[in-house]
Image (cartoon, helix red, strand yellow):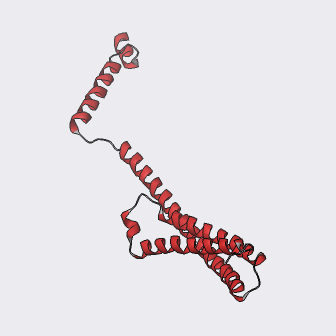
Amino acid sequence: MECSPCEGLYFFEFVSCSALVVTGVLLLMFSLNLHTRIPQINWNLTDLVNTGLSTFFFFIASVVLAALNHKTGAEIAAVIFGFLAMAVYAVNTYLAIKKWRMNSRQQSSRQTSDYIRARTESREVDHRPEIQRLDLSFLFNIRKKSTRSKFNPHEKEVRGK
């Protein structure tokens, strides 16, 4: 059976099935803690992108299906459930944004503390006695030379008497 004005229904089916598959895979990965085995992927951002795109596409598909439906009970129910799914994805998008911001703040504060720790360690003095001895003897030699200079006021008084 051919249906020429069914493009809205086909788009809605594509969006709902795609969202079901992608969200199902992510749900399975998070439930079984498989995401911890692949630390190279930012999973919070992946969840945020998935829920954001699903919200957007469910909104578009529900509006298109509402505008192009045949007023049958199944299509009206699909539009209602499409807007409900969009609302649930929107709430999940909001929660994913909060989680992503919280993790990015923690990560930036962790990087800042690592930076401060590295700077502090680089400024620590090396407490090796041979280095301290060399430094002190070097300073002592400079002081000896400066006390013997002809600009010392005590030496002039001694020479003048």
Foreground residue among 148 and 156: 148
Residue at the far top: name it: 160
Image x and y of residue 137, in percent: 25, 28
Residue at left offset 67%, top offset 78%: 1
Foreground residue among 105 and 70: 70
Q: Is residue 98 above or below residue 121?
A: below
Residue at left offset 44%, top offset 50%: 115
Q: Is residue 110 above or below residue 124?
A: below
Image x and y of residue 51, in percent: 58, 70
Residue at left offset 42%, top offset 53%: 114
Foreground residue among 75 and 113: 75
The C terminus - image quarter = top left
Left or right, 95 with reference to 37? right
Residue at left offset 36%, top offset 64%: 37
Q: Is residue 132 above or below residue 74?
A: above
Image x and y of residue 117, in percent: 40, 51
The image shows a total of numbered marks equal to 0
Image x and y of residue 23, in percent: 52, 73
Q: Is residue 30 visible?
A: yes
Q: Is residue 102 visible?
A: no
Foreground residue among 75 and 25: 75
Residue at the far left: name it: 130
Quadrant of the rendered structure where residue 83 is? bottom right
